[in-house]
Amino acid sequence: MAKGIGLLLLLAFAITGHALRPISTLTLEDQARLRAVFEQAQPFTDLAHAHYSILGLTLLSAPAPKDACTFLKAKVDVSNVQSLYHATSAAKALGNCQLNAAKAKQTLNTALNESADVPTLFYAVSALDSLKFPINSADVAKFLKAALKKDDSLLSQIYGLYIASKLSAETDVTEYLNSVEDIAAQADEIDDLYLQFEGGILPSAMFIDGSVKISEKTNKKPALTEEQVVMAGNYILSRKTTQNVRNAYLVVLATKALSINKFFVPVGFSLASSITVSPAQPKIIVQVTDLMTGSIGQLSVSTKSAVRKSDRSKLFTEKKLAGTADKTKFDLNFLESKPAPGFYDVTLVGKLAKPDSKFIGLADGSITVKVVTEVIVEGVELLVIDRDQSIATKTVNVQHPRKVASPIDADYHQNVMLKFVLKDKATNKPMPVHQAFIRMANLKTKQEVIFTSDRTDTLQYSFKLDVAESGRDHFNALSGKYSMELIIGDASIQNPFLWHVADVNLKFYEDPSKKAPEVASSPYEPKPVIDHMFRVPEKRPSKTVSSLFTGLIAVPLLVLLALWAKLGVNLSNFPMSLSAVGFHVGLGAIFGLFYCYWAYLNMFQTIRYLTIISIVTFICGNRLLGSIAARKLARSSRYKGLR
């Protein structure tokens, strides 16, 4: 039982520690890119874009365009509350831009009524606040409660936080501060890293900013856990690559709200230097800031541990990082501990000179460091071994990066072997790599095969080419000169390389019963022309047979004509009109076209003629049927009149 409780506590601590780490910050490079997004919105096309661009530049302490106020005055619609919200918010950010306040005040006060919905109240109250007009807090509080009863959607509740934060000090807004916890409960947690609302960046960013504003209004910390704050910040920062002006503004708005408040400020640990550590660059520089890359005050930073990812071996534990001229940056000579090449997880802890409980994650910093080195190749031997007796008939020692002077000969009675050792140049110790391949390529046909090399427990690499077997399985028994190249690559080495070790003359067993494979032509040479031939039509039957069957088909028509002659034909009901004649002629023409198609026309010619004939036949037939129906209707009416 005790073990189970201990395991649960350990798991809870691990999850909490994971969630308390901001995964990134809004670096100076990120801020410069977002500033470019705001500047690219110029020249402005509408008030909303102008609003988000101007406020975004203001939040980044960047100058707004000189003609921005002129645009706001020209585009604002003083009879529209939302238009006034965008214009007044942007004008307030500019600082020296005066709009037509008299007409705006009338529109905004009229919009504040019992039937107003929450967004309208938000736009009107925000605009009044931007214009520094008095707000009737008692009425607005009453209107807001009524509106939330009609619409308590997520965005309406978040708008409620903003509205409540702008009411007078005498107004009790405790219920809105308490609603922060209920709103947060509607968010979705993703991978224990992100906290987001349905609807994306808009409700997520406005919730963060609104929670800060209502907390500052009441001077009370909102009911949010540290994990929720960090995960919400992680989601906002995951959208920092956006190119949309509104979304970019929301990213900056929420990130700044999390960086400048007195209740909760997530702390980010990031590398201000390259992730790569090498003899040429042995130090790492760690930056500890808020999410806007601002200073959090005087502090010291030390490591908890540095653990190699591949085998979880611990390199060192506590080491204090040295301060720099920039009080947000600290450096550490990582190579002092003589780490093996690879990736390392470094956990960090920061300690403020003046402790402040609002900072989240100071004890849970984490960075990844990659230690790289140069690799050297030693003990390279190229051997030709008798396949049956396993005796080396030829041995050549090779020095990297030289190539064997003369080609090596080997036939299907022999094997070719390459042995080598890879060493860390800094320590001169053997080291493994992820990629150690041998590339064999036919110098004439460019056909190539890539093989993997084997590694022993002593970290010696070897590759054996069974000439007989490989000729059958890989080279199509195509004898000739092949280049042998050694390919070495790894994420932890600085000098990956491809080395042409030697040329090898391979002679494979040739089966006389099999045709020698054709030498592949260059893929860039023109291909032979393909002449397509349609299928030859089948031979038609003789004229006698065709005439006989045609006569048999015509027999029913002859019988019909004979019966009409004997019984008499009544043509009195045939309507003598253009549509009737046209329909029957068209129908006959279609039957005649079918004969022409059978006799000498092709399908495309037939379709072309059929299209013309069928259009005429359809129009005439439609009019004929209409006239017949009208005649029947008139006849029926007369019959009813007689009755």
Image: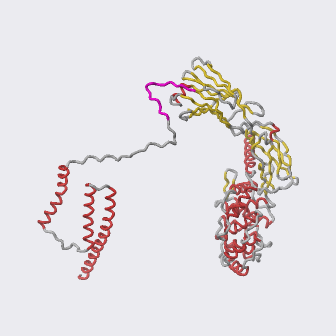
Query: What is the magenta segment's predominant secondary structure?
Result: loop
Find out whether residue 516 is within the magenta segment: yes
The span shown in magenta is 505-519
Residue at 82 percent across and 40 percent down: it is 317
Instruction: Give the answer, above or below, for where 73 lies relative to 550.
Output: below
Residue at 22 percent across and 48 percent down: it is 541
Residue 619 figure quarter:
bottom left
- Residue 530 position, x and y percent, is 41, 44
Residue 280 visible in the picture = yes
Q: Please tell me which residue lies in front, 253 or 209.
A: 253
Find out whether residue 236 is within the magenta segment: no
- Residue 328 position, x and y percent, is 83, 53
Q: How many marks?
A: 0
Q: Is residue 567 left or right of residue 459?
A: left
Residue 181 visible in the picture = no
Q: Please tell me which residue lies in front, 71 or 393.
A: 393
Q: Please tell me which residue lies in front, 462 or 25.
A: 462
Q: Is residue 531 left or right of residue 381?
A: left
- Residue 300 position, x and y percent, is 86, 49
Quarter that holds the N terminus: top right
Instruction: Give the answer, above or below, for where 395 lies relative to 189.
Output: above
Quarter that holds the C terminus: bottom left
What residue occupies the far left of the structure in this picture? 566
- Residue 191 position, x and y percent, is 67, 50
Colouring style: secondary structure
Residue 224 figure quarter:
bottom right
Q: Please tell me which residue lies in front, 192 or 489.
A: 489
Residue at 78 percent across and 45 percent down: it is 347
What residue occupies the far right of the structure in this picture? 353
